[in-house]
Amino acid sequence: MQNNLIERYIYAVTRHLPDKEAEEVSREIDELISSMLEERADNPGSEDEKVRQVLTELGSPEALAREYTGRANDSLIGQPHYSLYLKVLKFVLMAIAIGISVAMMVSAIIEGPYPGPSDTSLWINWSVDAVVEWLTSLTSALLSGFAWVTIIFAILYHKGVKLDYDPDDLDDLPEVPQEKARIGRGELIGEAIFTTLFAILFIVMPYINIPIIGMDAKPISLFTPEVLIGVRYLLIASIVTVILEMIVKFIDKRYSLRVFGAIILTNLVSIVTVSTWLGNPEALNPVFAERFQELTGLSVYGINGQPVPGFGGHWAMLPLPFLIVIVIVVIVAIIEIISAGVKTFSSKN
């Protein structure tokens, strides 16, 4: 039945259910509402009043969602929190698994028998140790991620914290988002993986960060560890804002005003972090810079040792790749904010 309030009510009930289940439940609820409205066809009142009476009689979308899924009210995490909890948990565990695997692989390569002795037993021992360390770290990280996500959602559920609408107010039901305003799963997966890798490389492993292989007998870290440690709080702030943005996106599943606000906050913090970090003349590992110049005869500072036109002060003599990254981050941040704003306000209109 075509009615905006009915569509919003059905969407509120099914929005966190699995796709196949959501489709079936949507049909059932729509048929039920149509049947109830037919019974009231001869009753006095406008069509809108009858729709509101029916939806009020059906109860809150949260309660109806629990009836369809069979989740009891005394469960650890009930609906609609439970479906969202499962989705967040999958994303978190997947991001942790990928991030830990990459970090352990990098660590094993750096700490391994480089550049490669011919002793077979040494290689076997190194491989076994690497696998054991990977399994131990992965298990510990997955258990921690599972525990924290479960605790957070259990608290939200038992404290009755609403996700994004008042279940007892029909006018507060979320609008069915336009296709272009929806936030896809791929976007969230990409953000989760990138955030995990970023945190591991630059916060957990600052002395390794991005190892450059082939320039020396041992890998050389690209960034100066001490500078990374010095901007650790900014890096952590960036991670926190990205996590906040992902949580809001998980809940709303579309571009809304609070998603737009979270995107603005994330990008502003990112600009400050990147400018402070890469804008430091000592951010690039001097050992790498010296070795690079020895091998290529080129200087990484400025344009081969000359000031970059249009930039003054220490900015003119920053490593050119870092200067390019800063400019790109600023441009991308502006584009992302504008794009999110267009999607947000166009969907509201």
Image: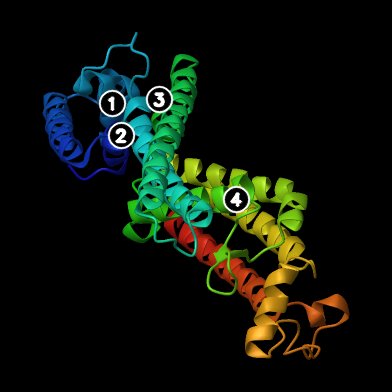
Task: State yes or no: discs 2 and 3 in contact (Cβ < 8 Å).
Answer: no
Measuring from the top left, give residue 58's x and y in whole percent: 25, 21
Residue at mark 1: 55
What is the spatial separation of the Cα atoms under label 3 and label 1, in whole angstroms? 11 Å
Dot 4 lies on which element? helix
What is the spatial separation of the Cα atoms under label 1 and label 4, in whole angstroms? 32 Å
Q: Identify the amino acid type marked 1.
A: Leu
Residue at mark 4: 261
Q: Nearer the viewer, mark 3 or mark 1?
A: 3
Residue at mark 2: 9
The crowding category of the residue bearing disc 2, from other C-alpha atoms within 10 Å (few below 14, some 14 to 19, many at least 20), is many
Measuring from the top left, give residue 11's x and y in whole percent: 29, 38
Dot 3 lies on which element? loop
What is the spatial separation of the Cα atoms under label 4 and label 3, in whole angstroms? 24 Å
- In the image, taking residue 92 as reference, residue 220 lies left or right, namely right
Q: Identify the amino acid type marked 2.
A: Tyr
Task: State yes or no: discs 2 and 4 in contact (Cβ < 8 Å).
Answer: no
Measuring from the top left, give residue 174's x and y in whole percent: 40, 40
Task: State yes or no: discs 1 and 2 in contact (Cβ < 8 Å).
Answer: yes
Measuring from the top left, give residue 268's x and y in whole percent: 68, 58
Q: Nearer the viewer, mark 1 or mark 4?
A: 4
